[in-house]
Image: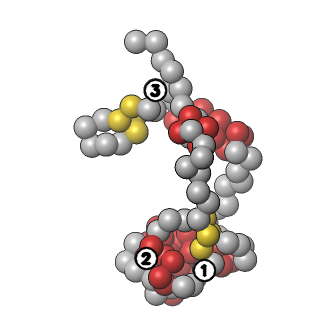
Amino acid sequence: MKFNFLKRLIIPIDLDVYFNLILETWNINVIPISHQIAILSTNLVIHKDPADRLICATTIILNAKLISKDKLISKANVVEVIWLNLSGLGKEQAIPTFQTSA
């Protein structure tokens, strides 16, 4: 994997292609933000990050468990948090990467 000077991942292919590949490879369903999720997220008291509140609200609405390493979400105790240790997998297996000819 390559990163730029801001330590952000450089993706050498079209972003739409990249995301579709990840979604298909890992059989991931994208859940849209419903009005119920949006409203619930404004009422959650976890911390100031609105993205984390949306993630927790989605987890609650779907009656799901959240796979996360975020300590602030875990400490808030508003959703069941589990952490899947992927250290046994190589990075190339955990995140699809692409080789480009330079």
Q: Amino acid at mark 2?
A: Leu
What element does badge 1 sit on? loop
Q: Earlier in the sequence, mark 2 or mark 3?
A: 3
Which picture quadrant has residue 39?
Answer: bottom right
Q: In x, y percent, where is residue 14?
A: 52, 30
Q: Which mark is residue 12?
A: 3
Which residue was labeled with disc 2? 72
Vertical placement of residue 26 versus 73, above or below: above
Q: Residue at x 67, y 60 (%)?
A: 31
Between circles 2 and 3, the one closer to the viewer is 2
Q: Is residue 80 visible?
A: yes
Q: Earlier in the sequence, mark 3 or mark 1?
A: 3
Q: Residue at x 67, y 55 (%)?
A: 30
Which residue was labeled with disc 1? 79
Does residue 43 appear left or right of residue 26 in this picture? left
What element does badge 3 sit on? loop
**Looking at this view, is 94 or 18 the one in front?**
94
Q: In x, y percent, where is residue 65?
A: 67, 72
Q: Which mark is residue 29?
A: none
Between circles 3 and 1, the one closer to the viewer is 1
Question: Would you call the spot at circle 3 few (<14 residues within 10 Å), some (14-19), or many (20 or more)?
Answer: few
Does residue 61 appear left or right of residue 1 in this picture? right
Q: Residue at x 40, y 12 (%)?
A: 102
How did the renderer colour the structure?
Answer: secondary structure
Q: In x, y percent, where is residue 69?
A: 50, 65
Does residue 44 appear left or right of residue 2 in this picture? right
